[in-house]
Amino acid sequence: MPLFALCAAILISISVFLLLQENIIRKLFGTLILSSTLSYIILICGRLNNKAPAFVSNNSHNLSNPLPQAMILTAIVIAFALIAYLSTLIRQILFINMKNSRKES
Amino acid sequence: MMITPTGLAALVLCIPLLAIIAHLFVKNHFLLRQIVQLLAITSMLVVTISLLILFNKPIVIQAANWPAPFGISFVFDNFSRFMLVIFSIVTACISLYSFYELEGQKATQNYYLGYWLLFLGISGAITTGDLFNLYVWLELILISALLLLQCSIRNNKEVMFNYALINICGTLLMLLSIALIYAKTGTLNFADIARHLNQLSNDETLPIFLLLFLSMSLKGGLFPFYFWLPTSYPTPHISCTTLLSSLTTKAVMLIMLRLICLFKPFHTVTFTTTLVLMSLATMLLGVMGAAIRFDFRKILSFHVVSQLGYIALGLAIKTPLAIVGALYFLIHNVFTKTTLFMVSGVVEKSYGTGSLNKLGSVATRNKSLAIVFFISAFSLAGFPPFSGFWGKYILIKAALNQHYYTSATLMILVSVMTLFSMNKIWQYAYYRSKTTTRRVDPTKMGYYAPLGIGILLVLALFMGIYPDSILNYLSTIAKDLSHPTIYINTVLIGVRT
């Protein structure tokens, strides 16, 4: 368990570092890593001790927790949509900047 | 055929979805869009008002009939039903105004999609009883806000990027806190979390809940995080700005109110002190930011921030009186701020500029507009016959009852400064004689914009002159909210009829 927490901490610090950079592409990568790390944290928060898949086998003990998977799936879909949106926005910004710099030169 | 309460309540979430689908078919035709919009908003008004009038007991929808802590519950108690009525009235007026503003503008054909998506997000977020579901609704609100900004910002894409990035970070922080709350309590249902928190000590849970509060305050625009708000609100069309300012941040405030009343870690002294300090800083810095701006919309946007501070102070004091004050102030603010933004939009459209340096003598050239602005501005500053006075009076009284003397003094100071910047707009744009600005099309106002502004103005005036009409209802809401056991029993045990 401490190892998982350490991994999460390292990933979060990488993403915060990237978010604080000035380059907007790096900011995008920061949000990407942050959102994936959060999925990972949700997985840990649902406890990892149990081995058997839920709803498949009949023995009712030692089943894995199905709820974090549902939450992660939702979070991934939303994060994917927002990051796709952000990248198109970045493309537009870079395009406008390029046109402006061409006008100046 | 009998209409069941849950069926009627589910319509609140269904009508926006149907309206989105209908708008997809009529995207390119302005008249058809107007008809669809009028039909949808009228049915929304009918549904929300009948929900408020027909039923006294709270209505709980358990999604797919899963019992409370396992499934997602939607709670339509007095609080959320009343707020839905207020929001649908305001959005109806905004859509009337949008007929005036967006006519003949090709780029804004996606506006109504964003509008209904935002309404869907708001009604879901206010009524939901599940923390993860709340996160999904807030993401929906963010996406629809981005859609609204997208259809009206042409060149200034950096504003949108900042708005998107900051709000995405806010929701991701919220997701982190939700994951940690889930790890700590093992449940996501509001009522169930509140029940489990009674068995945990505050020291364990306070950091997680502070994280939740910080992410909410980032979305709601409180002190250290308010900077995104005044930069993004003045840029789009007024129809978008009014929607964003009257729905998104206010809805976040309402959710915060519900969570603060429910969860035990929010009742600690540490949290209350943090929230009081943050709200005071928000109030002061917002109004100071407005003092140095010289643009109609920018001044109003900074006042949005300042007034969020008042609402947050009401949430911090948390006595029933303070909750009544905060809710009353919120409703007053939604009405008058929307009116002011619309007036600024009309002025901008008919004089071609919103800069106070260029405007002049609107009062003599456009008397009705000047009267509307005068009433709303003085209502915002808190003058006695108008609604702003009662909101501030109740908040100050609640602060004095709980011995927050500094906060009460600062509230009075901030309202004086509000008066100063409202007076600045009046002085420069309306009163001084300067007829050099051109006037674009004075007659083409139509019926829609005056109707929208008029309804809001009449409601705000009515709130000011007969405050009892609404205060009685608000005090029952506040009584329900300040006893969390009522909410917990409603959701977990069910409504006894």
Image (cartoon, coloured by chain):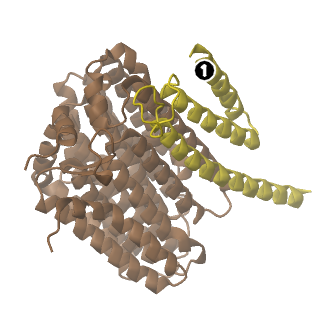
| Colour in which the image shows chain B | brown
Pick whichever, B178 or B326, lies toward us.
B178
Q: Is residue B470 left or right of residue B132?
A: left
Secondary structure found at label 1: helix
Residue B155: give x, y in percent of width and height.
68, 61
Q: Is residue B397 visible from the viewing direction of this image? A: no
| Colour in which the image shows chain A | yellow
Residue B266: give x, y in percent of width and height.
32, 25
* Type of amino acid at the residue the image marks with label 1: Phe
Q: Is residue B358 left or right of residue B265?
A: right
Name which residue lies at 74% across and 38% down: A26
Residue A19: give x, y in percent of width and height.
67, 34
Pick whichever, B384 or B323, lies toward us.
B323
Pick whichever, B136 or B466, lies toward us.
B136
Q: Is residue B76 above or below residue B263?
A: below
Name which residue lies at 49% across and 27% down: A45
The quadrant in which residue B324 appears is top left
Q: Is residue B398 above or below residue B426?
A: above
Look at mark 1 in the image and give the residue it sits on: A4
Q: Is residue B430 above or below residue B284?
A: below
Q: Is residue B196 visible from the viewing direction of this image? A: yes
Q: Is residue A64 above or below residue A55?
A: above
The chain containing the residue under callout 1 comes to A
Q: Where the N terminus of chain B falls, by quadrant?
A: bottom left
